[in-house]
Image: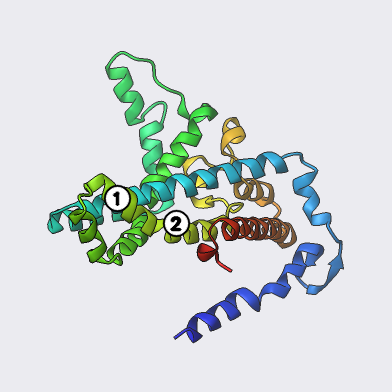
């Protein structure tokens, strides 16, 4: 049963790894990867020498940590609330409604956001004008965009992500719940002392998996919500992916793109190893290895 998964990762994850060499060469389409001129770490300089690397890294990590921590907490809360619903019909309808945003493309989300936040024609400013208030210049105010981006991500991903936690709750032995009720535990005590500890291993595993991509931003979401060329919002919305896209948009170079990808992968690998080491010290049974 494991063989298809092993073959998949061997073909698509391990066999292409020698291609990382492209990050250290001046790639020439005619010569190919291994016959292109070797230039060492020169391809990494375009990130370091611009002085934007640390800001881009900070923005990318900060957004991803917000997505991971807030997203998982909200998904756990939604899964618990669904589990507590007595009506099966209402539970299924609620799951379906919350699941739908996952299938909405980032392009459509960006369009919806623009129609709400646009200064001249947006629903928000039309409402503010109607009640006698001044309109808000959303697309020139960088301070509010972290909240907009995080809320949009949570809206889109919570319903889908809660399925894993809901499935984990369904795997909980009902006799344990019944025993807690017989002992006099109310709903809140049952959630605190039975369900949440039961979800702890699932949360840790998903957290460790997510940390591997902590330096890889959600390009589709950022590009369609903010765009890649709004300089007024760069301070709070520019991540590595949007910066690379903007830099290489007119003069694409495989080597520069590979250098950035390698930087993100190595950083993510270090984060996962470190986080797993910490988990192994605190809770050995929940570590990945």
Please give the name of the residue rendered at 20% of the width and 60% of the height, measured from the top-left corner: 178
Give me the disc on residue 203. Answer: 2
Horizontal relation, residue 93 to residue 140: left or right: left
Q: Residue at 63% across / 48% down in the picture?
A: 240
Q: Indicate the quadrant containing the C terminus: top left, top right, bottom left or bottom right.
A: bottom right
Q: Determine the secondary structure under disc 2.
A: helix
95 left or right, relative to 104: left
Q: Which residue is mark 1?
A: 191
Q: Earlier in the sequence, mark 2 or mark 1?
A: 1
Q: Nearer the viewer, mark 2 or mark 1?
A: 1
Instruction: Tell me where residue 121 appears, x and y as whole percent.
Output: 36, 29
Kindly identify the residue that appears in the image at 61 percent across and 52 percent down: 215
Residue 22 occupies which quadrant of the picture?
bottom right
Secondary structure, mark 1, is: helix
Is residue 101 among what the camera can see? no
Mark 1 Cα-neighbour bin, 10 Å: few <14, some 14–19, many ≥20: some
Q: Position of residue 69 (x, y in %)?
A: 48, 47
Is 34 in front, or is 263? 263
Measured Cα–Cα span from mark 2 to mark 1: 15 Å
Q: Are marks 2 and 1 in contact (CB under 8 Å)?
A: no
227 sits to left or right of 40: left
Question: In the depicted view, which residue is nearer to us: 235 or 80?
Answer: 80
* 74 up-or-down from 30: above or below: above
**Residue at coordinates 22% horizontally, 60% vertically from top-left?**
179
Where residue 249 appears, x then y in whole percent?
65, 51
Up-down relation of residue 123 to residue 212 (above or below): above
Q: Which of 98 and 256 lies nearest the eye of the viewer?
A: 98
In the rendering, at what x and y percent does residue 171 appear? 30, 67
């Amino acid at each position: 049963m494991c063989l298809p998964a092993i073959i998949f990762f061997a073909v698509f994850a391990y066999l292409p790894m020698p291609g990382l060499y492209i990050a250290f060469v001046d790639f020439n389409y005619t010569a190919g990867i291994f016959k292109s001129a070797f230039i060492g770490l020169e391809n990494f300089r375009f990130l370091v020498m611009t002085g934007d690397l640390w800001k881009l890294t900070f923005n990318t990590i900060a957004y991803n940590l917000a997505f991971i921590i807030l997203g998982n907490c909200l998904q756990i809360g939604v899964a618990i609330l669904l589990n507590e619903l007595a009506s099966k019909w209402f539970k299924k309808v609620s799951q379906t409604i919350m699941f739908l945003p996952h299938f909405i493309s980032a392009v459509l989300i960006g369009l919806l956001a623009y129609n709400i936040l646009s200064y001249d024609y947006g629903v928000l400013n039309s409402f503010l004008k109607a009640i006698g208030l001044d309109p808000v210049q959303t697309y020139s105010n960088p301070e509010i965009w972290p909240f907009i981006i995080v809320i949009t991500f949570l809206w889109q991903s919570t319903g889908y992500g809660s399925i894993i936690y809901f499935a984990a709750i369904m795997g909980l032995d009902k006799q344990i719940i019944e025993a807690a009720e017989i002992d006099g535990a109310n709903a809140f005590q049952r959630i605190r002392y039975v369900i949440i500890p039961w979800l702890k291993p699932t949360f840790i595993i998903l957290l460790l998996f997510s940390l591997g991509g902590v330096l890889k931003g959600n390009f589709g979401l950022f590009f369609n919500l903010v765009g890649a060329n709004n300089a007024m919002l760069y301070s709070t919305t520019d991540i590595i992916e949007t910066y690379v896209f903007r830099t290489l948009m007119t003069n694409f170079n495989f080597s520069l793109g590979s250098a950035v990808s390698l930087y993100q992968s190595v950083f993510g690998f270090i984060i996962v190893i470190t986080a797993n080491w910490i988990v192994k010290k605190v809770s050995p049974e929940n570590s990945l290895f």
